[in-house]
Amino acid sequence: MLETVISYLNTVDPVWIYVILFFFAFIENIFPPSPSDVVVIVGASLIGSTVMSFAPVVILTSVASALGFMLMYLVGKYLGEHILRRGRIKFISPEMIWKSDRWFSRYGYALIIANRFLPGTRSVISFFSGLTELRPARTFICAAVSAFLWNILIIYFGITIGNNVALIDQYLSTYRYIILASTGVALCIVIFRHLSRRRKNTRSSG
C-alpha cells in the first residue's frame, strides 16, 4: 500500500505534496489518530528524488502543527469553561480541573515544548493550555519550537530510510499502538479515580 502511495507521490507536483504535508501536520492536534507523523516521514522520503527540500518541509510542517495546536488552544479557551468547568462531563470533577489549572500554571509552557514527544497527549495539552489561558503568543512559539524539533527528527528519519516501505510500515504500526495504549491508560486512570472518589463520598455520606 505505502509503496504504491510513494510511487504515486513521485509523479505528483511537489506543490500538492507540500499541501498534503501541511494538512496532516495541522490536523494532528485536532484528530489525534491521524497518522500525521507517518505522512510527514513518507513525504520526507521524497526529498532528493523530487524538487522538495529539507528546510521548507521542516518549516511548513512546524508552522502547520503550531497552528493546529492553537486551534485546540482556542477551543479550550472559549469552550472549556462551558464544557468542563460547568460539569458537563460528569467523570471530570472540579478537583481534577483545579489540579490541571495548577499544573499548567506551573509547567504549562514546558509541557507545550514537550508535547510533540508525548504521543496521545497533544490535543489534550493544547486544549488545557487554552483552558488555563496561557499567553497566546508564548504558547504559539513553544508549540512551534516543539514541532520544529520533532519534525527535524522525523524528516531526517524519512530521508534516511528513503523508500524502505517495510520500515515505514513498522513505524506506522508502532505509532498506532502507542496512541491506543496511551489513550487507553489515560482513560483507565481517569475512570478509576472517578470511581474511587465516588466510593469515598458514598462511605462518608453513609
Image (spheres, grey):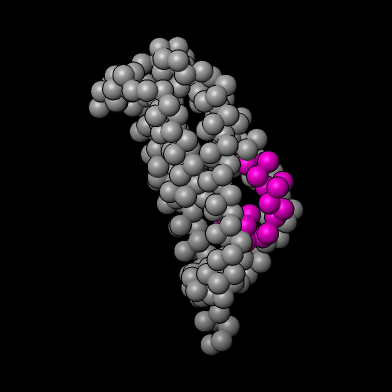
- Look at the image and give the residue range highlighted in magenta: 125-143
Task: Please check the rendered image and state whether residue 1 is part of the magenta-colored stretch, yes or no.
Answer: no
Depth check, front residue: 9 or 148:
9
How far across and how far down the image is residue 32, in percent? 44, 46
Q: Residue furthest top?
A: 48
Which residue appears at 52% of the width and 33% of the height?
61
Quadrant in the picture for residue 169: top left
How far across and how far down the image is residue 77, in percent? 61, 61
Which residue appears at 35% of the width and 33% of the height?
173
Task: Please check the rendered image and state whether residue 142 is part of the magenta-colored stretch, yes or no.
Answer: yes
Quadrant in the picture for residue 12: top left
In the image, taking residue 50 as reference, residue 29 lies left or right, namely right
66 up-or-down from 173: above or below = below
Whether residue 90 is visible to the viewer of this picture, yes or no, is yes
How far across and how far down the image is residue 127, in percent? 57, 56
Which residue appears at 47% of the width and 35% of the height?
22
How far across and how far down the image is residue 137, in percent? 70, 47
